[in-house]
């Protein structure tokens, strides 16, 4: 979500008269970014009776904040971080408001849909342990992650069932937002990835580690000599995608182990990675299709 639905939701939910909303939210929405940031940095946001904690805002900022620190510096970094914080704050308010609409209308998340989404992400990792490690890296417990997915399902279902038909966005609002938020219309790098994974127990002796490494290197040499990656994955991989010839699917930078991220997103389409070791074993990656970041044109973005 962004400023456009934010304004639309403001109009819609105001008409629905959620108690205690109008004055507090209009004050927040009309404040300039520096003032808004100072207030939010000091206290939690209260949206009716629901609180948004400072820690939640900081956690939501983290992925893009890391990217910004690598890309910008000095005053430009400060400006970008202030803009990011303002955007996250507005998104947090939007989410709380929509969840309140969901509660008012008796909408609940479908457990099967929640399980399906969690399972889809889980299956992108070679093991349950690696999935848990990725959650820990984001500061999440499995329960907290499930709660996040439940919120996502609720928000989408509420928009579809209650708010979707009421959103009225003017063309000039769309054009203005597109022109003033260029960073939001740059796509993230994505890669369709396949993997051969050779498992390594945590207690493996040094000679077992070396033997497994050599197995991985031999597999890579066979691929270089013309053997099919998928056939070798189906025969030798010890990961969950073995039956799919190692194909994981299309992923973004934060949907893979940190030890593999730089390698995976440094590959060109069709390229095979060197053997990479993680705490769980050895990995060979193939970029079936590397999708570089690009600027989304207006007609596509609108």
Image (tube, grey):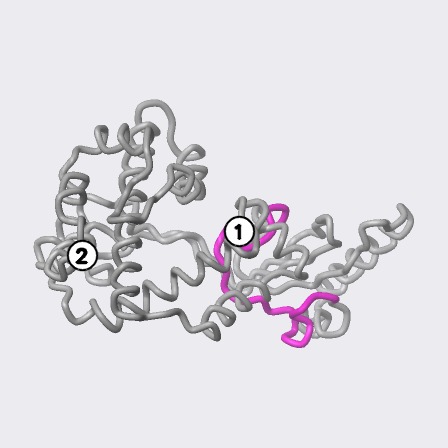
Q: Earlier in the sequence, mark 2 or mark 1?
A: 2
Q: Is residue 290 above or below residue 60?
A: below
Say what secondary structure mark 1 lies in.
loop
Q: Rounded to the nearest whole Å, what is the CA distance between mark 2 and mark 1?
A: 45 Å
Residue at 18 percent of width and 49 percent of height? 21
Describe residue 187's horizontal placement relative to residue 253 as left or right.
left
Q: Nearer the viewer, residue 250 or 44?
A: 44
Tell me which segment is drawn in magenta.
238-260
The location of residue 82, given as percent across then percent down, is 29, 33
Q: Quadrant of the C terminus?
A: bottom left
Residue 263 falls left or right of residue 87: right
SS at mark 2 in the image: loop
Nearer to me, 227 or 127: 127
Per the rendering, the mark at residue 279 is none
Question: Which residue is labeled 1 in the image?
Answer: 265
> Looking at the picture, does residue 41 appear above or below residue 180?
above
Q: x, y percentage for residue 205?
A: 90, 48
Q: Which residue is mark 2?
A: 18
The stretch drawn in magenta includes residue 254: yes
Q: How many marks?
A: 2
């Amino acid at each position: 979500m962004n400023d456009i639905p934010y304004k639309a939701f403001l109009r819609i939910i105001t008409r629905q008269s959620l108690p205690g909303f109008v004055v507090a939210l209009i004050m927040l929405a009309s404040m300039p970014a520096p003032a808004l940031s100072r207030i939010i940095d000091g206290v939690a946001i209260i949206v009716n009776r629901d609180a948004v904690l400072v820690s939640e805002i900081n956690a939501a900022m983290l992925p893009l904040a890391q990217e910004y620190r690598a890309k910008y510096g000095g005053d430009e970094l400060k400006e970008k971080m202030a803009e990011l914080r303002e955007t996250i704050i507005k998104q947090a308010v939007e989410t709380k408001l929509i969840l309140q609409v969901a509660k008012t209308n008796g909408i609940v998340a479908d457990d099967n849909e929640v399980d399906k989404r969690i399972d889809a992400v889980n299956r992108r990792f070679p093991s349950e342990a690696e999935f848990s490690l990725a959650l820990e890296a984001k500061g999440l417990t499995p329960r907290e992650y499930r709660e996040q997915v439940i919120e996502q399902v609720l928000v989408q279902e509420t928009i579809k069932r209650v708010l979707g038909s009421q959103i009225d966005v003017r063309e000039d609002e769309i054009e203005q937002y597109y022109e003033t938020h260029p960073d939001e219309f740059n796509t993230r790098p994505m890669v369709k990835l396949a993997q051969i994974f050779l498992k390594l127990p945590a207690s493996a002796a040094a000679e077992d580690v070396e033997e497994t490494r050599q197995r991985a290197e031999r597999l890579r040499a066979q691929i270089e000599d013309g053997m099919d990656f998928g056939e070798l994955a189906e025969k030798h991989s010890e990961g969950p995608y073995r039956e799919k010839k190692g194909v994981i699917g299309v992923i973004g930078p934060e949907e893979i182990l940190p030890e593999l991220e730089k390698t995976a997103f440094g590959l060109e389409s069709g390229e095979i990675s060197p053997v990479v070791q993680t705490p769980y074993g050895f990995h060979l990656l193939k970029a079936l299709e590397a999708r570089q970041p690009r600027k989304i044109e207006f007609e596509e973005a609108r």
